[in-house]
Image (cartoon, rainbow, N blue to C red):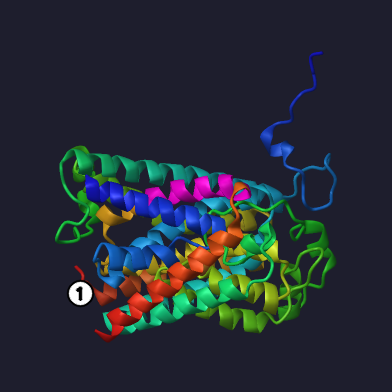
Amino acid sequence: MVVGLAMMATGLGAGVFGSLLGLGGGILIVPLLTLGFGLPLRVAVGVSLVSVIVTSSASAAVFLQRHAANLRLGMTLELFTAAGAIGGGILAYALDERQLSALFALLLLYVAISMIRRREPGAAARAGAQGDAASAPPAPLPSTTDATRSARPDIGFAGYVARLSGPDYAIERFRLGIVGSIAAGVVSALFGVGGGIVKVPLMHLVMGVPLRVATATSNLMIGITASASAIIYLLRGGLDPFVSAPIAIGVFLGASAGSRIAHRVDVRVLRVLFTVVLLYTAFQMVQRAIQ
Amino acid sequence: MTDHRRVAPASRAVAPADGLGSGAIESPSIRLDLTIARLLAVGTYISVTLLAIGVVILVAAGRSPLEADIPAFDVARVPADLASLRPEGPLWLGLLVVLAMPSARVAASLIGYLRSGERTMAIVATAILAVVAIGVVVGVALGAGPES
């Protein structure tokens, strides 16, 4: 019972932190389960993927209700993230624990550096960072409408891409977006994260999608990306239901609570603390890799 | 003074984001967004409830989540586990609902796009479901991994 409660508390903490910082719980859950509970890395990744899907579904429901996500763009890109996720799921079983730990440490370092370099501490920046979790939903934004879509050319590939754009933004560098989406899928499956750390910057900085739309759309995409690889973990016996359940419940509750208290918390302090935790965890992962 | 203004139904209360004006009829894309939102919300609550039931049974049985072996997934055993109140029943069922939700969302989109005659998006939705199906085939073909 104590272990179950400790796991739920772990999920709760990861959910609150993730929600406040615009990160998915996965980036915290995997190291907490491996370093704290001694689980094999692949099992921790499987557990994390379940939590990622639960929080993605919950937050995507809110984003869609507010018409903040671009469903068409999300569906088009998730075709490629799902393909990447299957590749990542296979790759995860081809690598040994030490290699995975080393790669995870690199991911943690990347996220920590992104946290340090972020300049704007406002809510939009927070929501736009990674967007994996059920973070505070953004205000409604214009999405691609039937009227504007019908006004665009519908000829060939360019016409299709034009129809994915919103009324106040146009999709750019779509082919690069496809390549990046495949990479996001691989990252998600390998490390049990939502992949928003790749998708949001990709959509916003490369493809010209407004930050809030990119965050909401990323949230939507995460579900199918994570489920494509989680199925492989399930069928390969790497999905532990006893651990997944308390963690997923904790993350769900934590993410919901986090989105409600977000406006009362000084995220700048939290970010510094989180960066220190990430760097320490990365160090632990490196140690695990070289042992 | 009592306010006798009527409150608009939930589906109408959401301001259309497509610039059609508050009195406009919901466009197919907005209707689809709302349908999928409802599907995801209901699915999330069902899955979390099933997982919570499983955890309660697990704790009541005095078992630890860190048992030595991960229980093997066997979909045929789920009904029997549910009937005999073994934690594996609701836990596996909850996990299956979790894993199925994103695909159910894509399937709902597919139906929506077919109804509205958006052939290209219907093809995209079908392709996503095909990729997920390939994942299932790959998982079965690779067989059990080292953790099982």
Principal SS element in the magenta part? helix
> From the viewer's perspective, is A238 left or right of A85?
left
Residue drawn at x 32%, y 56% as measured from the top left: A244
- Quadrant assignment for the C terminus of chain A: bottom left
Q: Position of residue A70 (x, y in %)?
A: 67, 61
Residue A81 lies, with reference to residue B89, above or below; the image says below
Residue in front for this viewpoint, A103 or A216: A103
> From the viewer's perspective, is A171 left or right of B130?
right
Residue A113 visible in rendering = yes
Q: Which residue is mark 1?
A: B146
What amino acid does circle 1 point to?
Pro
Q: Which residues are magenta?
A: A248-263
Residue drawn at x 55%, y 56% as measured from the top left: A20
Q: Position of residue A30 (x, y in %)?
A: 36, 66
> From the viewer's perspective, is B148 left or right of A111?
left
- Quadrant assignment for the N terminus of chain A: top left
Residue in front for this viewpoint, B134 or A167: A167
Residue drawn at x 30%, y 71% as measured from the top left: A42
Residue A185 lies, with reference to residue B34, above or below; the image says below
Q: Quadrant of residue A175?
A: bottom right
Residue B121 visible in rendering = no
Q: Position of residue B68 (x, y in %)?
A: 14, 60
- Label 1 packing within 10 angstroms: few (<14), some (14-19), many (20+): few
> From the viewer's perspective, is B86 left or right of A58?
left
**Chain ID at mark 1:** B
Residue drawn at x 45%, y 46% as measured from the top left: A253
Q: Is residue A252 magenta?
A: yes
Q: Is residue A118 magenta?
A: no
Report helix, strand or loop for mark 1. Answer: loop
Q: Quadrant of residue A177?
A: bottom right
Residue in front for this viewpoint, A208 or A235: A208
Farthest residue, direction top: B1
